[in-house]
Image (cartoon, rainbow, N blue to C red):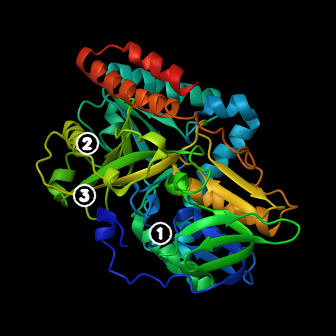
Amino acid sequence: MQPPRSLWWSQIDETSPRHSLRGDVDVDVAIIGGGYTGLWTARELLRRDPHLRVCVLEARVCGFGASGRNGGWVSALFPAPASSVISTYGLDAYTRQRLVLQNAVASLGEAARSDAIDCNFAQGGTLSFARSELQEVRGRHYVTESAEHGVSNEDLRWIEPEELKEMAWLEGARGAAYSPHCARIQPARLVRGLAEAVERAGATICENSRVTKIIPGDTTQRARVITAHGTVTADYVVRATEGFTPTLTRQRRSVAPLYSLMIATEPLPNSWWRDYGFDRFPTFNDERHLLIYGQRTADNRLAFGGRGSPYHFGSTVEPRYDDNDGVFTQLASSLRQLFPSLDTTITHRWGGPLAMPRNKFPSVTVDHESGLAAAGGYTGDGVTLSYVCANALADMIVTPDEETRYSSLPFIQAPPRRWEIEPLRWLGINTGIALATYADHYELTHQIESRASALLARLMSA
């Protein structure tokens, strides 16, 4: 099965799927999922020990999920707020984590270059624009609060409109929070290039090989992965299934699959870009409640996405949810509010699920007794986090008795809190989406803070 025709996939040369698993196989590490997490893990395992036998099992084709259709942000963002990390693990742990994520942005770019992957990596930072007085208050507070947590002015600062116009501009901008720790990429090129790189390193990739069961190991047998084409026996089985995790047995409450959708314009002329800048390709969003995200692509398009699609009862994941005309229309409307002179065709529309844990903390777990390992729960910040978590997995599998900068991160070996049973999960998540939508509309219309903002904050911290 070929991936949905997003902008990113439309720029990839057609390739034949790799062969499916052929009979029973015995390996050192079996990896379920051919996205960023699975492929980075394979790469890092083989960098640490080239003699390892590594097999990647992908249900469709590598990059079919979020890795091949995301917004293309290689950012140092962490899905849980700094206050949550600090209250749970302390300021020192938060600082170590922040520095690892910041350094990982450039490290990921270097890794791609060393593997000859041309993914249009450009580290122009990220801008979070303020387009109203309320948004400016939120943005300035974020910068001030971050400074109180030890974030330097070099890592995050507020940019006034005069300087901002020299970098990038959105309609009605009153300033922006700027961090240099973000790069723009073409995500499908990265994931497809990674697949080729890990094959060159010695890993085996089996596509169209859906896993139906994972059997933990014990004192009498090693871990096993069951597919319709055969069984893989391994010392370690790594689950790297992100937004598709709820489709696996007993994983329905592990993460909530939220749908994020995107649109892209046709290439825009340089004369149009002169009015808005983005010459160094910073990614961008603004301080509204319902997340949006965008980038100027290498071929001068606007690729723009956001949340707003409903959560589906029972953590259901189905291809038909990738399309939502109402959300696509709202994204196009929002894009034209940000760029009023935009008079062009929307050439691509696509979407799919991402994985949100109950507490918004990603996780990396390795059980050396059962041989089961897992990583994920990135809530949309997975391009960099997948690289970091893969390095942690590789360290914990190859050198389990050594503590490294990756394996000592605070969310390592800390399984996330499970979601509530239905219908509580459905009610809570969709109430949050509705509150964010209403709060943005109210603030845009009345230019004062909505009570829904406070209710949303309480709901998110519950």
| Among numbered discs 2 and 3, the one appearing first in the sequence | 3
Neighbor class of circle 2 (other Cα within 10 Å; few <14, some 14-19, many 20+) is: many
Q: Is residue 121 above or below residue 378?
A: below
Q: Position of residue 129 (x, y in %)?
A: 36, 35
Residue located beneath label 3 in the image:
301
Q: Which residue is mark 1?
A: 191
The local secondary structure at tag 3 comes to loop
Give how far across and how far down residue 299 sits, in percent. Answer: 26, 64
Disc 2 marks a residue whose amino acid type is Leu
Q: Residue 280 bears which disc, if any?
A: none
Q: CA distance from mark 1 to mark 3?
A: 21 Å
Q: Position of residue 405 (x, y in %)?
A: 75, 54
Q: Is 134 above or below relative to 278?
A: above
Q: Residue furthest front?
A: 228
Look at 46% across and 34% down and name the residue there.
426
Q: Residue at x 31, y 44 (%)?
A: 168
Side (left or right) of 291 relative to 380? left
Q: Quadrant of the C terminus?
A: top right
* Disc nearest the viewer among 1 and 3: 1
Q: Residue furthest left?
A: 343
* Quarter of the figure with the N terminus: bottom left
Closer to us: 188 or 300: 188
Give above or below for 405 relative to 291: below
Which of discs 2 and 3 lies nearer the camera? The answer is: 2
Q: Which residue, given by chain and number where applicable, does mark 2 sit on?
A: 331
Q: Secondary structure at mark 1?
A: helix
On screen, residue 197 versus residue 132, left or right, reads: right
Pointer 1 or 3: first along the chain:
1
Q: Are marks 2 and 3 in contact (CB under 8 Å)?
A: no
Q: Can residue 406 be seen at all in this image of the molecule?
A: no
Compared across the picture, whether 244 is left or right of 264 comes to: right
